[in-house]
Image (tube, rainbow, N blue to C red):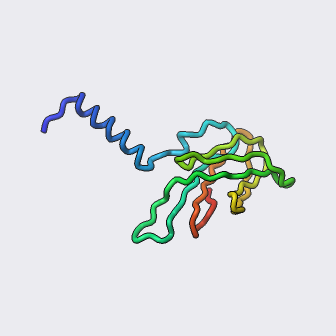
Amino acid sequence: MKMNSRGFLASLAFMSLSSLGCGDFDPDDAVTISQGVFGMTTYVDDVCASDCEREPRSMTLLIKSLPQDMDVASVTSNEDGFFEAELAQGDYRICTTFERCTDFSVGTHEVVRLDYEMSVGPGWSR
């Protein structure tokens, strides 16, 4: 089958758009903040027949400043599981609503990535 350049470009565009619906979201490309924290929240069904795949999960996260342990932000990840929060330089703790937390620091002009996997597994990861 012979395909002209217009047909090739159309099929390439279709493949690119269809792959976006298959979970190819890249959080590094979605970041809009210049300093703070961002990441992904996902869910893994720990009772599956074969390889368990991560699925995006919307979650609300609470961010506290340390050492005062004062609430500074609340953020909810979107349908892709992506979240971000602009933060000042300092030390923080980020927690799920069911109190799984991790501590992190933000330096000047630093964007920190933290991902959360909801399952019996690791929870927070960098």
- Please report the residue visible at 71 percent of the width from the left and 57 percent of the height from the top: 95
- Please report the residue visible at 42 percent of the width from the left and 67 percent of the height from the top: 51
- Closer to the camera in the image, 113 or 99: 99
Check the picture and name the quadrant holding the C terminus: bottom right
* Horizontal relation, residue 47 to residue 1: left or right: right
Residue 4 in the image, given as x and y percentages of width and height:
19, 30
Q: How many numbered tags mark residues here? A: 0
* Horizontal relation, residue 101 to residue 12: left or right: right
* Horizontal relation, residue 106 to residue 119: left or right: right
- Please report the residue visible at 80 percent of the width from the left and 49 percent of the height from the top: 71
Name which quarter of the figure residue 121 lies in. Answer: bottom right
Q: Is residue 66 above or below residue 11?
A: below
Check the picture and name the quadrant holding the N terminus: top left
Residue 87 in the image, given as x and y percentages of width and height:
74, 42
Residue 23 in the image, given as x and y percentages of width and height:
44, 49
* Residue lying at the far right of the rendered structure: 68
- Please report the residue visible at 78 percent of the width from the left and 51 percent of the height from the top: 64
- Closer to the camera in the image, 22 or 104: 22
* Horizontal relation, residue 54 to residue 118: left or right: left
* Residue lying at the far left of the rendered structure: 1
* Residue lying at the far top of the rendered structure: 6
